[in-house]
Amino acid sequence: MNSVFSRGWLAGVLIVAFCLLVLLLDLNTSLGVAVGVAYILPVLVASQVPGIKTTIIIAILCSGLAVIGLFVSPEGGSTGRQ
């Protein structure tokens, strides 16, 4: 049976597309909303791809996108900052 994960390029495209979707949601919501938690989903999906290298790359990518979302997201909500 051919699964999506046996075709590495297709799985990579889907995972990166999901990362970008989460980034768009993160950039369009205020800082008090925990949209960045959704970055765990692409990492979990990447963990199903054979080899640990893909998972590490996606985890680093998602971490960077979460930091970008932190600084670029609009103000508002409860951020804990005073």
Image (spheres, rainbow, N blue to C red):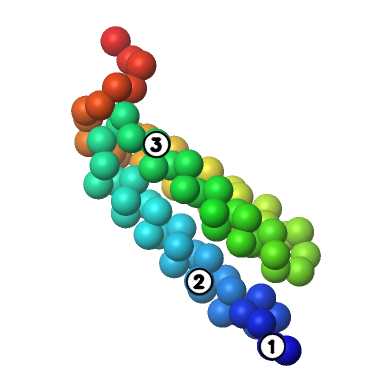
Write down the residue under mark 3. Answer: 34
Between disc 2 and disc 1, the foreground one is 1
Q: Is residue 57 visible?
A: no
Query: What element does badge 1 sit on?
Result: loop
Mark 3 crowd level (few <14, some 14–19, many ≥20, 10 Å Cα): few
Residue to which mark 2 is pinned: 14
Q: Is residue 5 above or below residue 55?
A: below
Compute the Cα span from label 3 to label 2. Answer: 22 Å
**Vertical side of 82 occupied by 43: above or below:** below
User: Which quarter of the figure is the N terminus placed in?
Assistant: bottom right
Q: Extreme top residue here?
A: 82
Q: Please, what secondary structure does the residue beneath circle 3 have? A: loop
Q: How many neighbours does mark 1 have within 10 angstroms: few (below 14), some (14-19), or many (20 or more)?
A: few
Instruction: Spot the residue most to the bottom.
Output: 1
Q: Which residue is at 50% across, 71% downward?
A: 14
Residue located at (53% from left, 65% from top): 15
Q: Earlier in the sequence, mark 1 or mark 3?
A: 1
- Give, as a three-letter code, the residue at label 1: Asn
Dot 2: few (<14), some (14–19), or many (≥20) neighbours within 10 Å? some
Q: Residue at (39%, 42%) from the top-left corner?
A: 35
